[in-house]
Image (tube, rainbow, N blue to C red):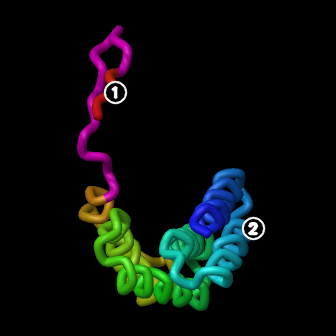
Amino acid sequence: LQPLLELDVMYGHTQFLLGDAPGAIATYTRALGTFDSNGEARYARAAATLDTQGDDLTALNRARADFTQFLAESPTSPRAGTAKRLLARTDAAIAAGGLSKSPVTAEQIAALTPQDVHTPKVGQPPVITP
């Protein structure tokens, strides 16, 4: 059944990347209906909800519940650090009355900025490092 767990999540990711956020959220929800312990689907649904419905307080509360449950069930997941930051962002958005009303701090920007960025020299191709 593991491939089915991954298939729905990957399909939801594809839908989201193609601009069908409502379809992606529905796919993640369907995946959770099949396997309630599917942490990847729970994380993805919360992140997609925050990203696309950030001014809907009901949706933000659903995203908050998903992030909270994800962290409770998967505290050692590679996504746990990001989930904690997104949960804090969700809480701030709820407190402000919506994501568009919530200020973005320099610390939040720094937390999401890639740390290992190599700027190529003029006339040189970019260097990709692991």
Residue at left offset 67%, top offset 84%: 33
Q: Which residue is mark 2?
A: 23
Q: Position of residue 72 (x, y in %)?
A: 36, 86
* Separation of residues labelled 2 and 1 (CA atoms): 34 Å
- Is residue 114 in the magenta section? yes
Which secondary structure lies at badge 2? helix
Residue at left offset 33%, top offset 11%: 124
Magenta-drawn segment: 112-126
Q: Quadrant of residue 53?
A: bottom right
Judge from the rendering whether residue 54 lies leftward or rightward of residue 72; answer left or right: right
The answer to whether residue 104 of the structure is visible from this angle is: no
Which secondary structure lies at badge 1? loop
Residue at left offset 48%, top offset 77%: 101
Our reading of the magenta stretch's main secondary structure is loop
Q: Position of residue 111 (x, y in %)?
A: 28, 60
> In this orientation, which residue lies closer to the viewer: 25 or 86?
25
